Image: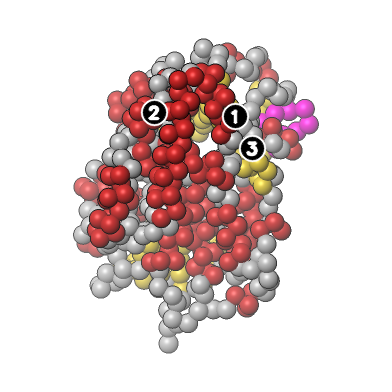
């Protein structure tokens, strides 16, 4: 007699690990299958030449969402990882030599706004108040709410209209801020979740208040330390984790019910519930037979607008660059024009804006003594652009190094002793994302909330989605929030296991 408590989670990114833990806390027997050789998905770790490089997300916000996962299992998160505050959150620098330290303290923000343009001080105050209102609706009310019914969307439309969510991030900021540099300071955040601020719905201004409310943090040992902590928690609580186990297909019976997965090895794993942390566009078109996809035929998936991709260079130096902040946003000479090239024209421009991660400012142990480790990230078009990265990658890296040498890292080229490059091909192959997009579908209005891939599949019963491609979207708070939505849409197991079976402790 079946107990109806078997759950399979596809993909061990942050969303998949959070989903596995939440399902286990509710009493499911959970098997987590991951295609690659390590946990983390985009949050993998590269160790090379004595350097530790965090491969993916390095900005930790809303840390309580991580804490919840440990508390659900009766654990104290402080026994597993340690977070350190990052100050400033970001340093935003401009080609004219000016810079803005993006922080949480309003007085410090206002002082810097006044330095750029005194007339924008009152405008910023009004903008911040609006961001707070958007946060209260967009995050506190909606981020953990499933959007798989039209009625849910209809209920929220009055708030969307009141908060002008039909406007873009840049458009709404420009209503309040006149200095073009300050407009860039308060609109670059959507790029961190795959959105063009000139196209992304202004609901994403909630990021500004989220960061002001809970700050920006970095784990001791790098973000890989959180991945390792989650791995330890899963092992302690009886979650079966299988690495090097890519899924070939999701099995669906004649009644349209997911019954398990078939691995590329040919092994079949049965389940009552299947949760996918993989890109929904790939899952629907590559893992589910088309006869089971009324809502998501191939043509509809193909018409989804995918996010941009990324070029990322990880490099270590035999000297330190102490003048840098932990997170540096290095803006180029063009803003809207560059983003148009990336998102709409899909061409690899001659100029770029960069995000430079310098974790040695918070944790020097990530590099050998006297050395420094970094990654530099450049938004680039996804693979629909047709760029030949086989020949372009090294040339593009050389141009980035030239720019970094001009913008605060003198003689960088001769001090690099270790490097690793990834480009859109990495996102398509290793991370199995459609068109090599780095963040799933673009977070434009017509692909947000009810219009985004649903957490509960409308095609296949018993199939659910977490991660950047589904509601509420990309970024660590988004993917952790998507796992929290499972508590609302996945039914309780018929015969739940007890956590006490795995040595549950009181927090």
Which segment did they paint magenta? 366-374
Q: CA distance from mark 1 to mark 2?
A: 18 Å
474 or 316: nearer the eye?
Answer: 474
Residue 67 lies in what quarter of the image?
Answer: bottom right
What's the residue at 25%, 73% (across, down)?
Answer: 255
Callout 3 secondary element: loop
Specify the quadrant of the image occupied by residue 80: bottom right
Q: Badges 3 and 2: C-beta atoms under 8 Å apart? A: no
**Residue that label 1 marks:** 108
Q: In the image shown, does 279 or 264 lie closer to the viewer?
A: 279
How many other residues sit within 10 Å of disc 2, few (<14), some (14-19) or many (≥20)?
Answer: some
Of the pair 310 and 408, the residue shown nearer to us:
408
Is 424 left, or right, of 321 in this rendering?
Answer: left
* Residue 261 seen in render: no
Is 73 situated above or below 297?
below
Q: Which residue is mark 2?
A: 176
Query: Residue drawn 69% across and 50% down?
Result: 82
Mark found first going from the N terminus, 3 or 2: 3
Image side of residue 58 versus residue 378, left or right: right
Query: Of the residues tagged 3 and 1, which is closer to the observer?
Result: 1
Question: Which residue corresponds to the image point at 27% horizontal and 69% vertical from the top-left?
Answer: 256
- Toward the right, the furthest residue is 369
Q: Say if 227 sits above or below 251 in the image.
A: above
For the residue carrying disc 3, how many other residues have a C-alpha within 10 Å: few (<14), some (14-19), or many (20+)?
many
Q: Is residue 173 in view from this perspective?
A: yes
Which residue does the numbered mark 3 point to in the structure image? 86
Query: Residue 92 location in percent, x, y?
Result: 54, 25
C-alpha distance separating marks 3 and 2:
28 Å
Q: Position of residue 332 (x, y in %)?
A: 47, 18
> Tag 2, which secondary structure?
helix
Q: Which mark is residue 339?
A: none
């Amino acid at each position: 007699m079946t107990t109806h408590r078997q759950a399979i989670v596809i993909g061990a990114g942050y969303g998949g690990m959070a989903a596995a833990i939440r399902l286990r806390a509710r009493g499911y027997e959970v098997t987590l299958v991951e295609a690659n050789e390590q946990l983390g998905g985009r949050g993998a770790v590269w160790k090379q030449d004595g350097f530790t490089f965090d491969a993916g997300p390095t900005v930790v916000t809303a840390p309580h969402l991580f804490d919840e996962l440990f508390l659900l299992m009766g654990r104290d998160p402080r026994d597993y990882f340690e977070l350190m505050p990052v100050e400033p959150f970001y340093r935003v620098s401009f080609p004219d030599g000016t810079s803005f330290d993006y922080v949480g303290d309003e007085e410090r923000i206002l002082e810097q706004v006044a330095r750029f343009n005194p007339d924008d001080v009152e405008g910023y105050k009004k903008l911040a108040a609006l961001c707070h209102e958007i946060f209260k609706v967009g995050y506190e009310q909606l981020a953990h709410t499933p959007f798989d019914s039209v009625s849910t969307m209809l209920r929220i439309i009055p708030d969307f209209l009141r908060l002008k969510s039909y406007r873009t991030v840049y458009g709404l900021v420009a209503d309040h801020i006149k200095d073009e540099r300050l407009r860039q300071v308060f609109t670059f955040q959507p790029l961190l979740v795959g959105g063009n601020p000139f196209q992304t719905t202004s609901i994403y201004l909630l990021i500004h208040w989220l960061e002001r409310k809970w700050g920006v943090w970095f784990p001791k040992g790098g973000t890989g330390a959180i991945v390792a902590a989650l791995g330890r928690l899963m092992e302690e609580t009886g979650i079966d984790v299988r690495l090097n186990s890519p899924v070939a297909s999701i099995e669906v019976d004649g009644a349209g019910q997911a019954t398990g997965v078939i691995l590329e090895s040919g092994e079949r794993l049965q389940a009552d519930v299947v949760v996918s942390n993989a890109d929904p566009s790939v899952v629907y078109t590559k893992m589910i037979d088309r006869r089971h996809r009324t809502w998501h035929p191939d043509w509809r998936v193909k018409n989804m607008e995918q996010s941009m991709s990324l070029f990322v260079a990880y490099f270590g130096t035999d000297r330190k660059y102490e003048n840098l902040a932990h997170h540096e946003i290095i803006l180029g000479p063009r803003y809207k024009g560059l983003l148009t090239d990336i998102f709409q024209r899909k061409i690899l421009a001659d100029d770029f804006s960069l995000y430079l991660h310098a974790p040695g400012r918070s944790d020097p142990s990530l590099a050998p003594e006297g050395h420094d480790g970094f990654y530099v990230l450049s938004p680039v078009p996804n693979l629909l652009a047709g760029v030949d990265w086989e020949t372009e990658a090294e040339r593009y890296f050389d141009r980035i190094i030239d720019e970094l040498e001009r913008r605060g890292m003198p003689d960088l080229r001769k001090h690099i002793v270790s490097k690793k490059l990834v480009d859109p091909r990495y996102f398509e192959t290793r991370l199995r994302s459609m068109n090599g997009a780095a963040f799933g579908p673009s977070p434009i209005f017509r692909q947000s909330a009810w219009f985004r891939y649903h957490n509960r599949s409308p095609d296949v019963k018993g199939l659910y989605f977490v991660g950047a491609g589904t509601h509420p979207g990309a970024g660590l708070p988004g993917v952790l929030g998507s796992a929290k939505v499972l508590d609302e849409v996945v039914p309780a197991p018929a015969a739940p296991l007890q956590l006490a079976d795995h040595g549950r402790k009181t927090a």
